[in-house]
Image: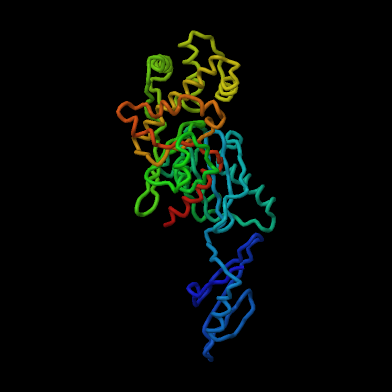
């Protein structure tokens, strides 16, 4: 257990909690000056103790016992809401990690409120008497956040931030772009949460400068984070919707085919779960092959197993386009501190991605080749990183 130290000894009422592997024991400490004597009365867990000020200070400064002040904004609810899945987590107390993570399919619920209630009901049953309703929440969503009204780009979820906060009976609800949350987590990632593609040693040191994160999932997210004198500042963006470009004649033909159906071919139109079928069809057309209509999961499975030549060629094209796009992001943001890869697609590609032309295409920028040569790249392997970023966002936005 931890006691308050001298600088935390305040007249009035303090809440503090014991720390350790067991559950926190909440203790209320009240100290007030006795009217008729030169002493103070200390009330600990409802028991009055009269003593002079020195005695109380000695009790509170016992080296065997310590404490930490309770933050009344806890428990906290965090969510990472994508086009296909919504992950939820619970932070019970200050200083604790995101816990009780559960993933729900977006299509299984008409709104985020319904999914949250199912999650919290299950959590209440699991935690029993230890459960407390969340006071604050942060939702990382796969769309631009520009107003109270949120519309998910690649799902049918729509909601008002204020109405959702009221329905869930939260004191505060923070809503931010999912890749803004992911970017917030980058400076705090450990080497164990990464699989390094290049410049392994640079990820062992504390990150510096500007970092970028790019994630092909259902859609394509992009964000950055910049180190300043006042801490890390996130640069949210909708960079996945920039126009994609070709690096050679083959890619020019692929884009020509894609434009027959999509006048504007963005990076997301090819480099995402919704984009892989478009890229697959374009590859089949250019190669003169007949191709069945397949979803992203089928294309990846058939491609990495090399059972289907067109699917395999689609993965090659994906890695090439993605390398060029990631290099563009690094140049645009000046992300010399590192480019991190998130999202659900690249982890499924496994070694096929690490052996692909991604890195060579990342660097291939003519006169700026040398600028990008030392930029490290790594795949984020921890699927909870966006939840961690959402938890960080609550403290950042309360400042």
Q: Quadrant of the C terminus?
A: bottom left
Along the viewing direction, whichever of 359 and 65 lies nearer the viewer: 359
The answer, for residue 59, to whether it is visible in the render is yes
- x, y (%) of residue 153? 47, 33
Q: Quadrant of the N terminus?
A: bottom right
Along the viewing direction, whichever of 287 and 387 lies nearer the viewer: 287
- x, y (%) of residue 81? 53, 40
x 50%, y 47%: residue: 390
- x, y (%) of residue 4? 54, 72
Q: How is the image coloured?
A: rainbow
Along the viewing direction, whichever of 370 and 218 lies nearer the viewer: 370
x 53%, y 81%: residue: 32
The answer, for residue 146, to whether it is visible in the render is no
x 39%, y 36%: residue: 374
In this rendering, the answer to whether 367 lies above or below 117 is: above
- x, y (%) of residue 34? 54, 86
């Amino acid at each position: 257990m931890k006691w308050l130290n001298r600088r935390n000894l305040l007249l009035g009422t303090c809440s503090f909690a014991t720390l350790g592997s067991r559950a926190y024991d909440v203790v209320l400490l009240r100290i007030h000056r006795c009217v008729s004597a030169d002493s103070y009365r200390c009330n600990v867990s409802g028991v009055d103790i009269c003593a002079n000020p020195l005695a109380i200070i000695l009790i509170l400064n016992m080296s065997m016992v310590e404490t930490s002040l309770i933050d009344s904004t806890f428990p906290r609810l965090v969510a990472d809401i994508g086009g296909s899945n919504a992950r939820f987590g619970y932070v019970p107390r200050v200083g604790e990690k995101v816990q009780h993570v559960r993933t729900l399919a977006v299509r299984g619920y008409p709104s985020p409120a319904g999914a949250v209630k199912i999650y919290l009901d299950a959590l209440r049953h699991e935690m029993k008497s230890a459960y407390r309703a969340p006071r604050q929440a942060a939702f990382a969503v796969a769309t631009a956040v520009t107003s109270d009204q949120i519309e998910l780009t690649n799902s049918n979820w729509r909601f008002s931030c204020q109405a959702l906060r009221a329905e869930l009976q939260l004191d505060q609800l923070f809503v931010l772009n999912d890749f803004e949350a992911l970017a917030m987590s980058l400076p705090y990632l450990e080497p164990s949460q990464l699989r390094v593609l290049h410049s392994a040693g640079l990820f062992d040191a504390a990150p510096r400068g500007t970092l970028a994160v790019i994630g092909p999932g259902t859609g394509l997210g992009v964000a950055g984070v910049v180190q300043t004198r006042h801490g890390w500042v996130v640069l949210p963006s909708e960079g996945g919707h920039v126009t994609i470009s070709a690096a050679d004649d083959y890619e020019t033909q692929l884009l020509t085919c894609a434009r027959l159906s999509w006048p504007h071919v963005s990076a997301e139109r090819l480099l995402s779960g919704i984009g892989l079928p478009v890229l697959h069809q374009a590859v089949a057309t250019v190669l003169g092959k007949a191709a069945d209509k397949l979803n992203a999961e089928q294309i990846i499975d058939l491609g990495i197993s090399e059972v289907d030549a067109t699917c395999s060629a689609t993965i090659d094209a994906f890695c090439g386009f993605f390398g060029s796009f990631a290099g563009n992001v690094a140049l645009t943001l000046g992300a010399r501190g590192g480019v991190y890869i998130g999202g659900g697609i690249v982890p499924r590609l496994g070694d096929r991605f690490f052996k692909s032309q991604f890195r060579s295409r990342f660097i291939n920028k003519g006169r700026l080749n040398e600028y990008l040569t030392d930029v490290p790249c790594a795949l984020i392997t921890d699927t909870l990183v966006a939840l961690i970023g959402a938890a960080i966002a609550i403290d950042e936005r309360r400042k």
